[in-house]
Image (tube, grey):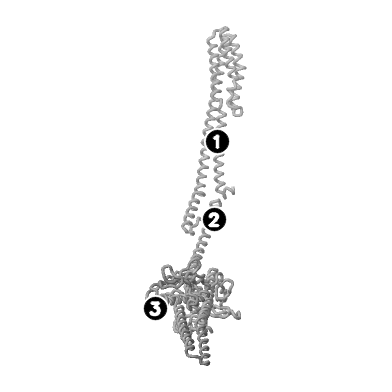
Amino acid sequence: MKILRHSLVARIVAFLLVISGMAIVSIGLTMLIAQSSRGDATAINVAGSLRLNSAQIARVLQRSTAGETVETVREVNRLMTRLTARLESSQLEQGHHYTRSGQLSEQLSVLKTQWYQEITPTLKQALHGDTLDIEAASTALNGFIDDIDHFVSSLEKSTEAKIRLLGAMQILFLVLIGILLLIALYDIRHNLVTPLRQLMVLSREAGRRNFRYRSHFTGQDELGQLGRTFDKMAAELSKSYSELEARISHKQKELTRHNRALHIIHNGSRALYGGGNDLCGSAAPMLRELEALFNIGPMVLSLNNEHDGSDMEILATHSPDRPRYCRDLDCFACLDDAQDPRVAPRLSHEQHTPPLSKSDAQTLVLPVAVGDLTLGYLTIGYGTPPSTSTHQLLNTLANHLATAIYLQQRIEEQQQLSLIKERTIIARELHDSLAQSLSYLKMQVARLERMQEKQLPMEQQQGVINDLREGLSSAYRQLRELLNTFRLSLDKPGLQPALQQTVDEFSQRLGFPVALTYQVPPHLLSANEEVHLLQIVREALANTLKHAHAHWAQVSFTFQQAKLYLAVEDDGVGLADDQSPPMHYGLIIMRDRARNINATLNFKNRSEGGTGVYLVFIPQTDRLIEEGSI
């Protein structure tokens, strides 16, 4: 019974089993009663035929006269034989032996006894006796017929009793099955349908994110347990949903804060990469904004000294003192607001929240490194440990600072190297041109002094004086060319602006425009290569101005298949024998400059007329930062 109280499925199965059992019992009893009724009609018919045979015998006896006749005896014997056969017939036994009625069997036995012991002797005596014997036989037969009628009536009542029993039993089982069905329907409605509806409402409300609805089931069956489980689940979902909403709200705020931090780092990175060597002015505002955003600080940036390996503090937010290396006394980016004269007057009217002191704050030390090269460390103070995402943002900040510092150092180194290269180029140009000319003039002066000591004739000294005059003119021209070259190359970066100025200058001097074609990628040539190429172009245009008598000239710079092609052409008189003049002073200088940059230089006459100077070489590009160093 305990399982029926605690299990709805067990109750439904029990109802089904009981109803099915009652139906099976009803069917079985019906079949049994029907089986017991088999032969009832046959028995009644046979019993009726016994009565008919008895009446026929009585009628035959009444028709006969006194005395025995052969026909009467034969007819009575035949009817007696038939009656005896029917009386002994098994058809008079009602149904199977286990369903036979004892009273009917007793009545049948009485009929047999009466037939064999009373009627048969009487009939035999009447066949051979007188009228009194016939009357006695008729009287006995009438009594026998009455007993047969009583037996037939008993058979009919027995059959009717079975039919009434079958009807009563069917009604009883129908009533019982109906009662069980009503009880089952009530139980199913009360313990299955209604709870299922409440569970559907609970699931629908849960789907609408309303976790306050409860089923309040108290039953011990499956749906009761399911309802309590749903209630518990709804309570847990309500709690989890509230926690998730709180976490989502917190994440949204954190994402907003991180988005703001990324925006600050992005803008700060632009200031870092474009702020020159003013690291304090470009990095300090970004660090102070991040401190205010994440409630951290102060931040201290220390860089390694390459010479002694010590750490030098170069930037600290909320610093009370100006750094020793500071070069701009008007900058207050590193100083605390109280030390800034622009902010101090405002603090007297506003509440100022100082950063965490060193005793109250813990520190987070992040390396400022590029690859395997550690440039320094960023020390960050905090009161509450930063989250993982905040830590990642701070690592990103350290990486941006490292990249900016590394690029700034490399740019400064490159600027120093460029300055040294520029000075080396100037020194080499002075040595290769003006210094040699001065040496030549010094030798001519010494020669002239020896000639004057020997008091040689003035005609011989005049040749030396002419050489001195020509040498001075050449040295002055070389000096002017060098000044023009370095002024052009230093006014604007790159070879193209210097070439454009050179072309504009010679266009005015020649009296017609000189065409310029420049198809070279930017930052391809080194400063040494640019100076040599510019000097070659100037020397070639100078030759066109002095010797070509041209009306058209063109300068072409192109870059194809990793080679640079230079062509300076004109439509002048050209060379005498279509060969490069062996001892021309300007051409010798152009050959030396082409040799210095490992270029191939050719001079030849153009088929259309005029001269062409053609140079081909492979540029040796200097890279600001070597590949793989970052």
Rendered image: mark on residue 509: 3
Dot 3: element: helix
Pick the residue in front: 111 or 425.
Answer: 425
Amino acid tagged 2: Thr
Q: Which residue is mark 2?
A: 229
- Can residue 386 be seen here? The reply is no
Amino acid tagged 3: Arg
The picture places residue 147, in percent across and down from the top left corner, at 56, 21
Left of 507 or right of it: where is 48? right
The picture places residue 505, in percent across and down from the top left corner, at 40, 77
Vertical position of residue 468 compared to residue 224: above or below: below
Q: Residue at x 57, y 7 (%)?
A: 70
Pick the residue in front: 281 or 470.
Answer: 470
Amino acid tagged 1: Ser
Vertical position of residue 462 compared to residue 71: above or below: below
- Disc 3 to disc 1, how far (Cα)? 135 Å
